[in-house]
Image (cartoon, coloured by chain):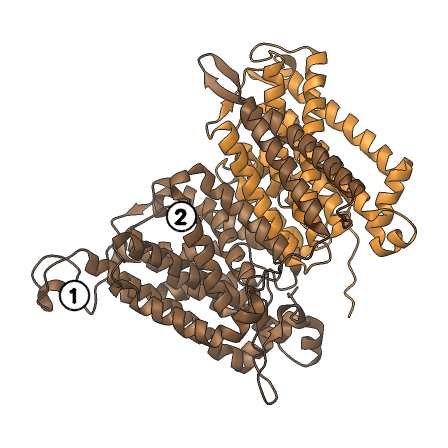
Amino acid sequence: MRPVAASREGVLYALRDAGLAALVAFGLFAPLVGLRTDVVEGGLALRGRWDDVAWLCLIAFVGRLAMVLLAGRRLPRLALPAPLARTARYVTPFCLGLALLLPWLPFVERYELDLGILVLTYVMLGWGLNIVVGLAGLLDLGYVAFYAVGAYSYALLSTTYGLSFWVCLPLAGLLAAFAGVLLGFPVLRLRGDYLAIVTLAFGEIIRVVLTNWVSLTNGPNGISGIPRPGLFGLAFTSEEGGFADFFGLEYDPVHRVIFLYYLILGLALLTNWVTLRLRRQPLGRAWEALREDEIACRALGINVTVTKLTAFAIGAMFAGFAGSFFATRQAFVSPESFTFIESAIILAIVVLGGMGSQLGVALAALLLIGGTELFRDLAEWRMLIFGAAMVVIMVVRPRGLVGTRTPSIALGEKRAIGGNFVSEGH
Amino acid sequence: MAYALQQLINGVSLGMIYGLIAVGYTMVYGIIGMINFAHGDVFMVGAFVSLITALLLGLGSGAAGPGALLLVLLAAMAVTALYGWTVERVAYRPLRGSFRLAPLISAIGMSILLQNYVQVAQGARVKPTGTLVPGGVTLMETDGFAVQFSYVQMLIIVVTLAVLAGFTLLVTRTPMGRAMRACEQDRKMAALLGIDTDRIISLTFVIGAALAAVAGCMYLLRYGVIDFYIGFLAGVKAFTAAVLGGIGSLPGAVLGGLLIGLIETFWSAYFSAQYKDVAAFSILILTLVLMPSGLLGRQEVEKV
């Protein structure tokens, strides 16, 4: 874009450019917004909505005009990374403290807690996928498949064999990890976009199988009546011997929500802790080396097969944990919860968070999930805004919200490094 | 035998649609090396514009004349090409030279955006149209099973072949096509030789979108029912077709499209229709594992 001085030609140029933008907007919106197809008796009918088109064209004109006129000026930079990097040591404990104390804050009601549980589920999924994408550099677009495996494992094991949540949780993680290895084997040789599309296909295969294997999964109707977990055998019911009764409290359904909140917080923190520990160990270092350069890894004698498979397996395991949590929270699972869009959302959280930054992933989950929740009254518009936000954030900050990393190992003092020094994997 | 012939006809006409979309994927991948995830949704936009133009021309029900159909096709191509151009300009161009995942995420966002935009603008309900091209010929009849070759299927095959022929001429015989091929081989070198690579990339998106619009129009004529979600599956399958044929190879994309169409049709006819998507995706995985460069693709050499 040419810088436009505040000269007469500059303004004329800007006006012409903006006029073109409005023309393009007219071409784009006239057929699809201007003419709405309505299903009427005996076929379809068109209904004109030209005032909306006029508004959209005006927005395009003004927006483009502002962009061209301001292009030459130095806008105040969205200076998020540097201060955030410096204050990270305060931000992290603050966030952690807030998360721990959330149920006890005065303004927090049932709705806020449910939202907190939702956000934390995505934080956990984001951290789990971060192992695969951010650390090992393997682009996975089918992550939701492992989430589904975890959810269905718990749903089926508990409804068929009556196993408790605490027994099923490790089993679900194990099964999901197994699915991860199953996916990992065929894709060992693939890289980049090919890997992405195969993982996407894998995710879709799992969903189609869940939908059509009616005798096992009850098909599109899903499985309902999944038992709720208890705390060391104390059920969250109003009956005698329940949680409230045991502690001599008055029964309140919010107890269960608080319990679920701490459960997912614990699981998410476990994911984080394992990731941070693994990063310092040979396996984690092998992952990061693999992300930077696979050929060099081979030359240095790293077993690439094992390294990739463990990344898939461990990432999938956490998705499995999150999946069984999801199943127990909803008490219902159906294939509809595991569409591609979920994978896309989780991947967006990881990339927008800055790929590899634990804090960034958490903040991105809060922003994307909590942010779109604000628009939930706008039902249909919610995903529209979500998609637009993905594009805009990517264009404005392609390196994610937290553009810096702390190196896993350093000689002497640890300093944050720019995200652009980190390879994005293959 | 008759049954198989019928499936062959169905498979080829479906495969042509996939092939048209696959060309768009393969062209973009060849030039800028990214999966244009929103391409399937551009196809969906093409189908919607076709529907709206058809309604504007009063083709809501009953047969349509060839002139009106041509007008529908051209309008769809023009508007969809504009969408293709805008998508590239807004979501991909600012990210050129950025790290490789950035355009992919932006493309996924664009795909979500387009889908929900059409849902908001046109409503979530499926849009049924009457049969615009009715009738057909009966090729043979054995044991009470008549093999139908409908006019719509003929139209799809003829239009697709014509469009692809025109497209091939454009790529192989014109200066613009030469510039496109040069960009595909080495974008930096092409720029040094005075080719406006940004313009060529824009053109690639415009042409890809126009081809997707043809596919969308054909889809509308063939199935008569569209909704805002058709782009996702069609897009993934067309990408599968592009990979199967060898990504970056234009004849490969069409060949891959035909194969995917045939596999899907025969699978639904002889095994189970519910698992036809699984069949298509398994083919994708098998191809990539056994033959990563596809049927007609070049072997990629890994460099340090």
Residue occupying image coordinates x 68% and y 81%: A300
Could you tell me how far apart the alpha carbons at marks 1 and 2 are, in whole angstroms? 35 Å
Given the current orientation, which residue lies at the most extreme bottom position?
Answer: A412
Q: Secondary structure at mark 2?
A: helix
Mark toward the start of the polypeptide (1 vs 2):
1
User: Which chain does the residue under circle 2 lie in?
Assistant: A
Given the current orientation, which residue lies at the most extreme front position?
Answer: A7
Question: Is residue B286 among what the camera can see?
Answer: yes
Residue occupying image coordinates x 81% and y 33%: B167
Colour that chain B carries in the picture: orange
Foreground residue among B211 and A23: A23
Colour that chain A carries in the picture: brown
On the image, the x and y values in percent for residue B139 come to 67, 16
User: Which chain does the residue under circle 1 lie in?
Assistant: A
Foreground residue among B135 and B75: B75
Q: Which residue is mark 2?
A: A374
Q: Quadrant of residue B223?
A: top right
Q: Which residue is mark 1?
A: A234
> Residue A179 vs residue B194: left or right?
left
On the image, the x and y values in percent for residue A7 come to 78, 45
All told, the count of numbered labels is 2
Residue A42, placed above or below residue A21: above
| Three-letter amino acid code of the residue under disc 1 | Leu
Foreground residue among A86 and A43: A86
Residue occupying image coordinates x 46% and y 56%: A367
Q: Secondary structure at mark 1?
A: loop
Q: Quadrant of residue A305?
A: bottom right
